Amino acid sequence: MSKKLVVGSAQTGPVASDDMTSMVPVAISMIEQAAERGVKMLTFCELFMSPFFPNKLIEQFDHFFVRSDSPVLAEIRAAAKKHEMALILPYGEKADTGMYNSAMVCDSKGKVVGTYRKTHIPAYFPNEKAGGTGSFEKFYFTPGNDLPVFDVDGVRIGVQICNDRLYPEPSRVLAMRGAEIIFMPICYSVYSDPEHRNAMWPLAMRSRALENGVYVVASNKVGAEGVREHLGRSMIVDPRGTILNEASNSTAELIVQEIDIDNVSAQRKKFPWWRDRRPDLYGILSSGE
């Protein structure tokens, strides 16, 4: 017996305002569109309510962060709850323990199941080429310290935010903890090398799906914010590493896909990497030696 679920990836466009409330109507519109198309679980992209501020050094950055009970988030959550839609809601989180690049996970009843905080915080040097702004996330974000799996309406999900996806180990941990879908909110631009960045874009999502036998639902921003050109191409990948649906690289849009959760266990049986793994040989991964 199949276990069908309609998932959605909301690819939003560039943000001109530092005021996060400007993106609330956009988010609600995407949720309304998703509801009309039968979506039951929806993700937005990384930091979608603000410009991608970490590509600059800004000393006064508190306004890019809100607490988990912020009215800005509550309004978006209420829209999803109205349609009994589970939601992966990325935002800059202000907490007592630090500032985090986070994704709140809500079930179809509007309950906050938990929050994932980005664990792998990057920093890239700028260069003199067009769009070569670099990224300075380490100045802004405290790294998270957990890789949780959430039970959302009977489906086990994990979250990896942008740079996290480039590391195979955390996705494997999520899969070993029972994740059937890994949602990946992303804010990926071409920087100064569009040819290479376009070519490498699908590799991580397809690899993480294939090597773990999970669905991957990735959401990316699209369009130009100043000199920063976001790639778009949000995608939904099946447990065989096949791209089921992919957005354009030019416009904000919602992609929707019906998936069968039972394909996760079926794929793991057909390609028995789980059976043939050799953890006894992988000690260096945890020891660092």
Image: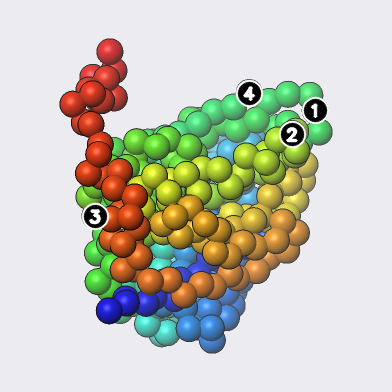
Q: Earlier in the sequence, mark 1 or mark 3?
A: 1
The total of numbered circles placed on residues is 4
What is the CA distance from the residue labelled 1 to the residue labelled 3? 43 Å
- Lateral position of residue 198 relative to residue 34, left or right: right
Type of amino acid at the residue the image marks with label 2: Asp
Q: Earlier in the sequence, mark 4 or mark 3?
A: 4
Task: Check disc 4 and report the residue beneath it.
Answer: 125
Figure quadrant of residue 267: bottom left
Residue 82 lies, in percent from the top left, at 41, 85
Task: Check disc 3 and report the residue beneath it.
Answer: 178
Type of amino acid at the residue the image marks with label 4: Phe
Task: Check disc 2 and report the residue beneath it.
Answer: 193
Nearer the viewer's eye, disc 2 or disc 1? 2
Q: Please say whether residue 269 is visible from this viewpoint.
A: yes
Q: Secondary structure at mark 3?
A: loop
Residue 116 lies, in percent from the top left, at 34, 51
Up-down: is 163 above or below 182? above
